[in-house]
Amino acid sequence: MYSLELLKINAVFLRPNEPFTWASGIKSPIYCDNRLILSAPQSRRLIERGMADLVQSKFPRCEMLMGTATAGIAHAALVADLLGLPMGYVRSSAKDHGRANRIEGKMPQGAKVVVIEDLISTGGSCIEVVNALREAGAEVLGVVSIFTYGLQKAARAFADANTTYYSLANLDELVEEAAANGYISPDQKKLVLDFRDGLNGK
């Protein structure tokens, strides 16, 4: 359901024959831009409600949400509003002025926090946020994201950090929906999955 919603609003681009270049330099047949969810009210309501339900069901002890900068901030705010929870966000680095904060928002010591992320690829930047929150005294219960590529590198990173994560949508579901609804051909579906499996060393 969520994968199809992302496809409908073009938040996920599939170009198996004309790959994108990720920031890492990797040539990828898929590109995910979850910022577009914010511009699509119907999809936004569905996805934010889904994330709120994940937080409630998987992390019922949650007392506060923390968004990742910058893409996770708006989603954390919307989900926090649905749940009636406080929220804040974690910068990629501390400010070089004012109070030199890295963590924005009032977070009590020992607060039970869930991190809201838009996208998980290798998991590295999200784990940095988890570590920053723990160093600041939070009890990080886990992470909820909109989409994950399903990379083994991410699974290992979260396991090493002793952190649980859940995503509304993943690559396997998305390419199934894309092929079933005419966004890509069966051959293109195989190209996308082969790309992911190649990164996983399969």
Image (tube, helix red, strand yellow):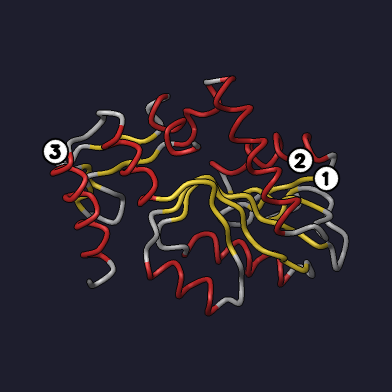
Q: Is residue 60 left or right of 147 when viewed as pictured?
A: right
Q: Which residue occupies 63% across, 50% down? A: 116
Residue density around tag 1, few if under 14, some if 14–19, many if 20 or more, within 10 Å: some
Amino acid marked by disc 3: Glu
Q: Amino acid at mark 1?
A: Pro
Q: Circle 2 is placed at which residue position? A: 80
Q: Identify the amino acid type marked 2.
A: Ala
Give how far apart the Cα atoms at labels 1 and 3 are.
43 Å
Label 1–label 2 contact, CB within 8 A: yes
Where's residue 81, x and y in %?
78, 35
Left or right position of 129 against 2: right
Question: Which badge, 1 or 2, comes first in the chain's sequence?
Answer: 2
The spot of residue 98 in percent (x, y) is 73, 47
Cα distance between the residues tagged 1 and 2: 6 Å
To which residue does mark 1 refer?
A: 86
Label 3, label 2: how far apart the Cα atoms are: 38 Å
SS type, badge 1? loop
What residue sits 31% from the left and 43% below the top? 175
Q: Which mark is residue 18?
A: 3
Q: Nearer the N terminus, badge 1 or badge 3?
A: 3
Q: Is residue 174 above or below residue 149?
A: above
Numbered label attached to residue 180: none
Q: Is residue 130 above or below residue 167?
A: below
The residue at the point 57 percent across, 57 percent down is 166
Circle 3 — which element? loop
- Tell me where residue 14 sits by quadrant: top left
Q: Position of residue 9 (x, y in %)?
A: 42, 24
Residue in the image at 80% along x and 57% along y: 60
Q: Position of residue 97 (x, y in %)?
A: 67, 48
